Amino acid sequence: MDTTILIILQILAAVLTAYLIYYAREKGKNQANKDDLKELTKIVEDVKTENSKEIELLKANLLVFSEKEKQIFSEEKEAIVIFFSQINTWIWDSLNIYIHEYSHANYQEIASRLILMRDNYNKTNVAFSKVKIIVDDDDLIASGHDAISKTLQLHHFVETLLKRLSSNLSWEKIMVDQVLQKDFDTLSDEMKNYYKSEGKKSREERKAITDEYFGQHGQTFNPAIASVNNFKDLSKKYLRK
């Protein structure tokens, strides 16, 4: 009996010892888990703080980017509008002329018209240079180049005829002034025939210039207008993106 009790007590002691050892281990684990949890919590809070800073920085950068995008778009719109306005000024203000209204009495105005044409051509190129720098659209840039090219063909056509007309009218003015300074009836037949011949050649040349202008003007004017309108249409699509 005593032996049985002793064995039971030994078993209980062993179980108690095992339990105490297990308890001690678990206690240690719990303490370790608590320490780990504190450390993990600190890490999470640090990450949240860092992420918050990154998010705020990202928001600030996005705001700056958005403002830059708005500014660039505004400058693109302004550059396109200025160029479109200038090329139309070049066409309608300086190249759209009434050639039959020039005579030996006002031919000096042709020189002013030629200066205006060249000035508008230069301004158009300057305006387009900004478009090429700021607008990022190959089709639109190509359309602008084509509009300038077609308008320049019209420019050369008009300029060539105006120079011919100016030369014709200036010579006619000289002839008229000479005749007015003299008594035509007292001139020799040779001089009379000379002035008549020069007058006839001058009128024929002026008519040829006028006929060429009205006969061929549409061949250069219409393509220029069509090309400018194509640029306008592409510009509308680009600015509505």
Image (cartoon, rainbow, N blue to C red):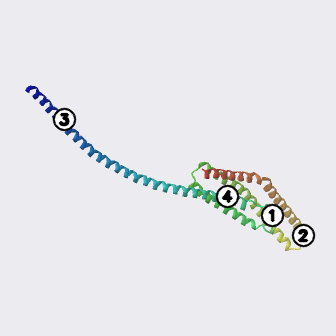
Mark 4 is on which residue type? Ile
Task: Left or right? Give the position of 140 relative to 167.
Answer: left
**Residue type, numbered disc 2:** Ser
* Cα separation between marks 1 and 2: 34 Å
The image position of residue 200, as x and y in percent, is 86, 62
Task: Determine which residue is flagged by label 2.
Answer: 188
Q: Amino acid at mark 3?
A: Tyr
Q: Earlier in the sequence, mark 3 or mark 1?
A: 3
Q: Which residue is mark 4?
A: 87
Instruction: For marks 3 and 2, give the CA distance.
Output: 151 Å
Instruction: Report the number of numbered marks.
Output: 4
Residue 174: assigned label? none
- Vertical order, 92 against 141 (above or below): below
Q: Nearer the viewer, residue 3 or 31?
A: 3
**Residue 115: where, in percent of width, then height?**
69, 64
User: Which is in the foreground here, disc 3 or disc 2?
Assistant: 3
Whole-angstrom CA distance, mark 1 to mark 4, is 24 Å
The answer to which of 234 and 219 lies nearer the viewer is 234
The residue singled out by tag 3 in the image is: 19
